Image: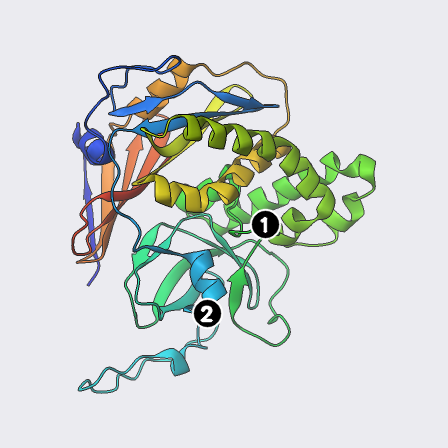
Amino acid sequence: MRLVIGSAVAGIAVMVIVAAAVVVPCMLQAGEVAPASGYSLLSPIHSGNLTVFPVVASKSYDTAEFLTLDEGLRSGDVVVTEAGQARGLIRHRPGEAAIIHPVRGAEVNRLVLVNNSKRPLLLLAGEIVTGGKQDRVIGKDRIVPAESDPVDLSVFCVEPGRWVPTNGKYEFGSAGGVVGGLVAAPVVRSKAMAAKDQQQVWDSVRSSQRAMATTVEVTGAAPAVNATTSYARVMDNKEVQKQVDAVAAPVQRNYESVIRQLRDKNAVGVVVAVNGEIVWADIFASTHLLQKYWPKLVRSYATEAVVTRAKGGEASLKDAQKFLDDLQGRHETAETEPGIYRQTEITGDGFKVFELTSLLPKTGFAVHVAKMAN
């Protein structure tokens, strides 16, 4: 049974977000800022108009049991399909009576997922799946228990204009030309997570496509970029990939170098700035989990930088720490699947925070926190 709770908050948000890291190191390394949130920020990494501030914590949690969407799709343990195609996927456990689920047709904002793995599945808002009748982006963070019955997914279309199955198939696969799949850029991700509005998602997809076409125009690739309505295919274009890689590669290389030098630290996330403006933060419960998502997250941030190219100022360490520490909101809503997860949305002045807490046995910690500037 799903429970939805809404309440005003005053101070609760801070306790929730920093639960994963409450012990502050006594000695700060050069470039670190004394944190008010329980997290430490390291010196920024720059690449063009993109700036990334590594986030470290003094504690991390055991997240080895969590399966990612890309791992599940590659192994075949996770199946994602259009609504109305999941009848044969329903699991009947010994001693249980068969449950007849009504069959509905395919819907733009609904997919069905089955986790056949013996591990719980972690889904991040912004992850893109391709196939079916049109490509979709996951609309919210959530956890799907091991060996689940079919569950409805809240999704948004990121391929306006197509409504026919790919090669006659209704199932979906992982998107992107790099290992680990594809996460939409923050400009698209935010419309799914915060606005929860299909038209705004489509508008942001089209805007990103136009910006990419302009960026690769000098290479002659603009016609190919404009020829598709699929966000994933735009991002898979070779010339687009070159532009994104030019920004992403230095950040990924430098970030990994920093973390190797600080083996006693727990790298758990990043604060992201584009054109001198802080726009996003992603924080995980462990370095292990961050490493799984990092390749596609850094490309997501790089894509944002490419499609919003402009000369701007430079975000400071102080700015980034303030963004990370300012977590108290005016309003909070929480959606709960008892015994599985709680997803909390906090609205503050000029920002939103989304926190996914695992309620599975032996957990009870925040698995992922995302903060976006409005």
Q: Position of residue 194 (x, y in %)?
A: 39, 42
Locate residue 11 relative to residue 156 in the image: left or right: left
Q: Which residue is more in the foreground, 105 or 79?
A: 79
Q: Is residue 274 visible?
A: yes
Amino acid type, residue under disc 1 in the picture: Val
Q: Residues within 10 Å of mark 2 (few under 14, many from 20)?
A: some
Q: Find residue 143 and name its label.
A: none
Q: Position of residue 106 (x, y in %)?
A: 48, 71
Q: Position of residue 126 (x, y in %)?
A: 46, 48
Residue at image coords 46%, 69%: 76
Label 1 belongs to which residue?
178
Image: 313 above or below 233: above
Q: Under tag 1, what secondary structure? A: loop
Amino acid type, residue under disc 2 in the picture: Gly
Sequence order check, earlier mark of 1 and 2: 2
Locate residue 29 relative to residue 278 in the image: left or right: left
Image: 19 above or below 142: above
How many numbered dots are placed on residues in this image?
2
Label 2 belongs to which residue?
76
Q: Under tag 2, what secondary structure? A: loop
Q: Could you tell me which quadrant the C terminus lies in?
A: top left
Residue at image coords 40%, 45%: 193
Image: 77 above or below 332: below
Image: 337 above or below 314: below
Q: Which residue is more in the foreground, 131 or 79?
A: 79
Locate residue 101 relative to residue 255 in the image: left or right: left
